[in-house]
Structure formats: C-alpha cells, structure tokens
Image (cartoon, rainbow, N blue to C red):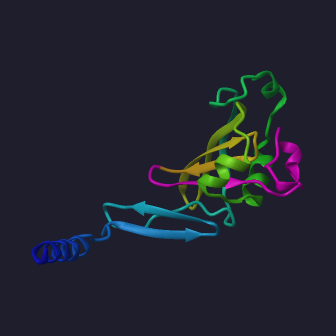
C-alpha cells in the first residue's frame, strides 16, 4: 500500500511538471472574445480593428450559406451597399461562439467580400441574421450587431430574453 501511494505521488508530480504552455501561442484579448493565435514565425499578428479606418474592396450577395432555413427566396431583396457594410462593421461588437450559436439566426443570405485595413486584406461575410466574420489567413473574428439603428438592414435580429 505504501508503494502504491509513493507511485501515485511521483506520477502526479511528473505529470504536472511535464505540461508546458505552447511557446508559439499568443493570447490576444479584445472586448468580449479572446483569440488565441499560433504564430510559428513569432511575427506580430494583425487583427482587424472595427474602430480603425478601413475600406471595402469588393462585395457580393450570396444565398447559399448553410442554414436550417431552406427559403432562399427572401435573399433576392436582401442587398447591402458598401456604405451599409461599413456602418454595420463599425457598429458591431465581438461575440464568442456561444453567443453566435444561441442568439443569432443562421440564414442562407449573406454578403461576402474583401476589405483593406493598414495595407492588409481581410475577407468578410455578413449573414442576414445580424452576425459576421472578418479574417485573414491566420485569424478570424466573429461580430454581432446588437443596436436597433441599422437593424432594418438585416432579415432577423439577435435573440433577446424578451422573446421567450
């Protein structure tokens, strides 16, 4: 019995000491979301900043985003101008995966394109359910639109507790 206790004790010591954090990992926190970025070259990582200036390079409407709503007819009249896209991005806030999954509709209509900030190009996708992603080759952020000012630009608003 004494030997068993010693073995378990030694095992727990070595197990705790053998766990090292990833040396190539950098934790970046912004608003409500923490983004863990692994950068093998140890260069600085550029994350899109909704508060800094940017310009829309291109945008197009799509109606084939994977959705539980098969009705793509509603997408024919859902169009976002470049100016609307810019306003939506500037007025949105970072969300986490839990918020994205539970409080936003995932509709088949989306606006996709590219934008440029600080000479870096980012891809964006704005879903008509009031959420979006912006990313480049190594980092993607999720944003949600929560204000009422531009809510008419979306086909569905975020879920609130009042809707129960």
Residue 101 inside the magenta-drawn segment: no
Q: Nearer the viewer, residue 71 or 117?
A: 71
Horizontally, residue 77 falls left or right of residue 118, namely: right
Residue 155 in sight from this viewpoint? yes
Q: Quadrant of the N terminus?
A: bottom left
Q: Which residues are magenta?
A: 137-164
In the rendered image of this protein, does residue 105 appear above or below residue 120? above
The residue under the point 68% across, 29% down is 68
**Residue found at the very far left of the displayed protein:** 3
Residue 71 figure quarter: top right
Q: Residue furthest front?
A: 1
Q: Is residue 65 left or right of residue 88?
A: left
**27 relative to 81, above or below:** below
Residue 132, can we see it? no
The answer to whether 135 appears left or right of 155 in the picture is left
User: In x, y percent, where is residue 17?
Assistant: 23, 76
Residue 12 lies, in percent from the top left, at: 23, 73
């Amino acid at each position: 019995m004494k030997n068993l206790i010693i073995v378990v004790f030694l095992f727990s010591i070595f197990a705790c000491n053998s766990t090292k954090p990833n040396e190539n990992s950098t934790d970046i926190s912004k608003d409500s979301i923490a983004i863990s970025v692994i950068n093998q070259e140890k260069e600085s990582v550029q994350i899109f900043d909704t508060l800094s200036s940017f310009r829309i390079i291109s945008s197009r409407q799509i109606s084939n985003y994977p959705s539980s709503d098969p009705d793509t007819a509603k997408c024919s009249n859902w169009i976002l101008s470049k100016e609307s896209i810019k306003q939506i991005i500037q007025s949105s806030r970072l969300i986490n995966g839990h918020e994205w999954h539970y409080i936003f509709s995932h509709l088949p209509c989306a606006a996709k394109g590219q934008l440029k900030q600080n000479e870096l190009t980012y891809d964006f996708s704005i879903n008509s359910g009031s959420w979006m992603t912006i990313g480049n080759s190594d980092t993607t952020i999720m944003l949600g639109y929560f204000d009422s000012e531009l809510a008419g630009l979306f086909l569905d608003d975020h879920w609130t507790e009042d809707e129960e």
